[in-house]
Each structure stands twice: as structure tokens, then as C-alpha cells.
Amino acid sequence: MNPLLENFDTPFETAPFHLIKNEHYLPAIKEAIQLAKSEIENIKNQSLPDFENTVEALDRAGERLNIVSSIFFNINSAETNDTIQALAREISPLLTAHSNDILLDEDLFNRIQQVYEQKGNLYLSEEQKTLLDKTYKAFVRNGAKLDDDQKARLREIDRELSQLGLKFGENVLAETNKYELVVENEEDLEGLPDAIKESAAQTAEEKNKPGKWVFTLAFPSYIPFMTYAKNRDLRKQLFIAYNTKSCKGDNLDNQQHIKDMLRLKNERANLLGYPRFADFVLEERMAKSAPKVMDFLHNLLEKAKPKAEQEIEELTEFAFKLDGLDKLEKWDFSYYAEKLKKQKYEVDDELLRPYFKLENVIQGVFTTAEKLYDIKFIENPDIPKYHPEVITYEVQDLEGKHVAVFYADFFPRPGKRNGAWMTSYRGQKVLNGVDQRPHVSIVCNFTKPTKTKPSLLTFNEVTTLFHEFGHALHGMLAKGNYESLSGTSVFWDFVELPSQIFENWCYEKECLDLFARHFETGEPISEDLIQKIKNAANFHQGYQTVRQISFGLLDMAYYGSDPNSITNIPEFEKANMKVTNLLPEVEGTLMSTSFSHIFQGGYAAGYYSYKWAEVLDADAFELFLEKGIFDHETAISFKKNILSAGGSEDPSILYKRFRGRDPKPDALLKRAGLL
């Protein structure tokens, strides 16, 4: 018996993690592929094609495969090991081949094309029209109109790309896991808060180095060290380790993988009739074209760079006055920025941490969602987990009706990649009149509890939790008929709106009063501290904006260039980040080789989306500020038109329906202090 192929006899048909073993994955994937193939054959054997028996049926096909592959690849991100990674290298090409079998099937495409050509005469809802357009475009954009030789080449390209993406991620994870900064003398920890030292001592014990302190490249270890450690040499050492991941010319080097991916993606775009990969991607984005993206980024840069240069000049003078530092380096930035912020605004992360006990922040997130969207979260330990640290919840509406399942996984582990993300194990759809509710997860890498203290979050970690939870709300509140248009299945430069807008509540007293309490005394965070948080919100916004723009420009340079001209990755990165450089270059460092967003994740030719969505989120939140941050009418409108609508219509239409007009950039520029 393979539990992945049985009906899940678990609460809400959740993944039976307690029964799944590594040896179940490959057979389950293979059998699920065969089942999906038979479903496709059944579609092809129907009588005259229509919307229901072809387009809708195709959207319904492959459900078991979707669920099994979602479980597997989510585990590969959050709880991987050598066996899982080896399986991923075997499974990924199977799934790529299966996807190509569908998208390159001439008979299936002919049926879809016949329905598409009749669309003017069909009585379809807006959602059905979107599904028909999306399905037709998916086939065309994946080679349905190519000849046999071209189709064969496209298959080979996709197979190679699937393997390269996996290898890129494995190398970054291996580099992250293998590095340790071992500190033997306590004086080298000067400046670090006691909680961070205790956490580093605990890490040392776990790594059989008692009596020492170990710092790693995981965010909750790396960021505090760079922010507070007075020892400049050790900051430099850790900075260089972090910024030389997978570029050392050894077996974990990603430079050739990048070149290969760029070449293959460009060839794929050329096969499909696009000059560059960026042109292919942006056709299905709100931005529509590479020139529009570049104009957007450069217009922002024009406004942000003068402010950023002023900030760096001020910080350089501050570091000189404080410590006689004659040259500010990249490993100095966070350290002196935190000190300057504390001097200017009398607030820093360590002053705020005691008010952000993880359990309280989680409850604050839940209460915020309840007040806005009429839902509640009930912990349910009976839902199976893939790791003991995972917390499982049932989501209900206020009448007790089931809405979703929610998984939360908060702390770093060797088997978990860095960063934070939202994902799902099952999407939402309506099938035979039954609304299948989603199973949604957020995965983070927050500060772990120690023997003497609970998990106390930095304010940045608080905003990260709200950000990922905003994505989760997009998934959990989905209300569509088709899974491929449901939840976060929207244009990539629209998907960050629900996440980024939710961060705004973290800065509002009415929200902070719900959960920000001192973990020892229970005292609520003071009005004075909240005001300091708001005052400091724009601190170094010029620098942060330029930094995000630099990543967007580098991404567009990679995917908008002739890959044959990219012969040296360090030189290419240096040339394309020159316009955004605010601090001296550090020889030997390279961020491209661990830029997982664009080489492993889904942000290739799409990193600009973060700033694009910031325009939307600032403009949308302005309405909440006008009406009240918990105004029920505004919240329900956002829920109906944005969160529940998913990709049922073009995002510009959905946004205008909520806001009453197109977005304006003024709110973002004002919020960032750039006006």
C-alpha cells in the first residue's frame, strides 16, 4: 500500500506525513503520471470539443499528480536530505516530460484551438473566458505550434533546465550548511545581545563544540552578527562567506549552471518566436514588456538614488565620528546603520524584541485576519506534520464553517533552505458542486527559542511573518471554480500585492496593541515605542529601494541579454550593478551564484515584481488609512476583489474594482520618503 495513492484518511484529507516514507514518492509519481495520461486520453476521445469536455476537463485532470508532486517538492524545500535530493533529480525530469507530453500533444491542442476559435459564440463567464485564454496561450507558449524537430528540442531544453534548477538550489543549501564561524573568545562577541550569544552557544553545543559560539549563514544567525558584532574582522569574514556562496570554483560552484540556464532559456524563447527570454516572460505580466520594466526601475532609481547617496554620506560621517572609520565597507553597513538608527530614533531591534514573542505575534496575525476577513484559526494537533516543529491549524469562518488548513513552520534546520515562503499542498476549486478548500503553508527561518528565552522576533521578522501570511490569505480565501485560476495563481507582478499590503498593519498602533506585549511583564508596547517604529520606518528607504532596484536590473540584464555575450559572471554582475553601487566593491564576492529567486525560483525576468507590487500595496493601503485600518467594508471589498478572486480576471480589472481607479505611484514615493 502506498499512502500517497490512497484516499487520505486524515482530518480534511490532509497529507498523511506520518505514513509517507521516502520510498513511496517515486512509485506514486509514476503511477499518478499514468493516471493523468489516461485522463488526457479520455478528453481526446470525447465527441466534438466544447468548453466543458475539453478546457474544463483538462483543468481537472492530473489532480492526484498535483497533490503528490506538491507534497514531494515542498518537503524538498523544507525538510530535505540526500535521499530526497537524489529523488528530486529523478522525479523532476519525469514531471517535465509529462508536462511536455500534454502541451505538445497535437490532438489535444487541436481540440483546444477549436474551442478557442468559437469563443465569440460561447456563453462563458469571465472566469471561463480567462481559463480558455490561459489554456490556449499555455499551449502556444509551450510549443504547440512548433514542428516535430523543434518540439523534440524544446523537450530536451526543459529536461536540462529542470535538472539545472535543482542543482543550483542544492549547491546553495550545501554551502549554507557547511559554513561555521566558530568563536572561542567571548571578547570577540562584544556588542552582541545576550540572547544572540546564548543562541550561538546552543548551536555550538548542537555541533559538538561546547564552550564555544557558532554562527552560521542562516538568517537568524548571520543578520544579528552583522548588525551588532563590534569585531570588524569577524564581520568581514562572515560577510565574505555569505557573499561567496557557490562561486569558489569547486563542485558547489554555480557559475556554469547560470550560463547554461541563460543559454537554454534564451534558446527556448527563440524557438517560440521571442527575441529574449524576458520578452517571453513579460508577455504574461502586468508590465507587458522589458522596456516598460526598465523605465519603471530607472524612474524609481532616479528618485531613490540621490536620497540613498545622502544616507550613505551621513552614515560614513557617523562611522568616522564614532570609531574614526576612514572608509565604510559593505560589512560595516548594518552595524553602523543600527547604531545610527538608535541614535536618531531611540529604537533598535533589541529594544523591540521583548515585545515580539513569536506566539504572541502569531496570535496577532490571526486576530488581524479575523478582524479584517471574518475568519478564525484553531490549532489542530491531529493534522499530520512533516516535522515536530510544524504547527497545524484549521481555519474557519465566524460561523464555524471550514475555510482552509494552515501549516506554520518557523525555525531554521539543516534540511530547510534559507528565507521565507508560502506554499500549498492542495489548491482550491469547485468540483461537482463541492468547494474543495485549500491546504496552505508558510515556511520561515526565525530566531529560535533558547534554554532561557522564548523565540523573540526582530521587527523585520515580524514584517516577514505578516508578509508570508498575506500570501497565505491569498491562498486560504480563494473562491474560484478552477484551481489553475485560484488563490495565488495570478500574474507574477500582482502576486506580491496581498503579501506586501499586509505588512502595513505592523506599523499601526491599532494592530500592534493586539499582540505587542513584553514577554516577561506582559506590558503592552508603549505609544512612545510605536511612534518610534513609525518614525524609523523610512530609515534608509533610499538605500533599500536602490538595493531592490539593483536586483531587478541585474535580473533583467541576465534575461534580456544575448547569453553568448555573458562569458564571465563576476564581470557581468559588476557591470550591471555599477549604476546602483553605493559602497565599495568587495573583490571575490558574487551574489548571482546564490540568487535563488531568479535561477531556482519563479522570479526569472520578474524580480522587478516586488517594487511593482509596492506601488499597488501603498496605493491600496492608502484607502485603508482613509477609511480605518480595520474598516469592514474596505476589508471585505479587498477580500472579494483581490484575495478571493485569484486569477479569474486580469489583475488591472480586479485592482480597479477594489480601488475605483488605476494605481498611482505617489503613495509609495510618499511612504518611502522619496517625495
Image: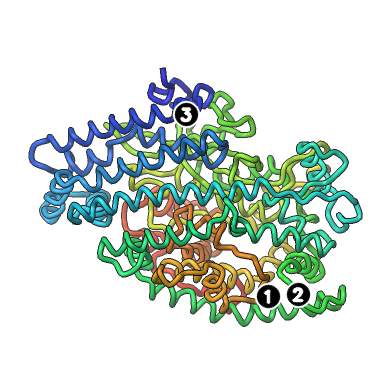
Question: In this picture, is 346 found above or below 496?
Answer: below
**Front-most of 474 and 589?**
589
Distance of label 3 from label 1 (alpha carbons): 48 Å
Q: What secondary structure is marked by label 2?
A: loop
The three-letter code of the residue at mark 3 reads Ala
Residue bearing mark 1: 583
Residue bearing mark 3: 15
**Front-most of 218 and 410?**
218
Question: How many residues crowd around disc 1 within 10 Å: few (fewer than 14), some, or many (20 or more)?
Answer: some
Q: Is residue 495 left or right of residue 122?
A: right
Q: Residue 518, image x and y in percent?
A: 79, 46
Q: Residue 278, image x and y in percent?
A: 38, 66
Question: Is residue 438 in sight in this rendering?
Answer: no
For the view shown, which residue lies furthest in the top direction? 1
Residue bearing mark 2: 328
Q: Residue 550, image x and y in percent?
A: 55, 71
> Which residue is located at x 73 percent, y 81 percent?
313
The three-letter code of the residue at mark 2 reads Leu
> Which residue is located at x 29 percent, y 53 percent?
154
Question: How many residues crowd around disc 2 within 10 Å: few (fewer than 14), some, or many (20 or more)?
Answer: some
Distance of label 1 from label 2 (alpha carbons): 7 Å
Mark nearest the camera among 2 and 3 is: 2
Q: What secondary structure is marked by label 3?
A: loop
Q: How many marks?
A: 3
**Front-most of 413 and 527?**
413
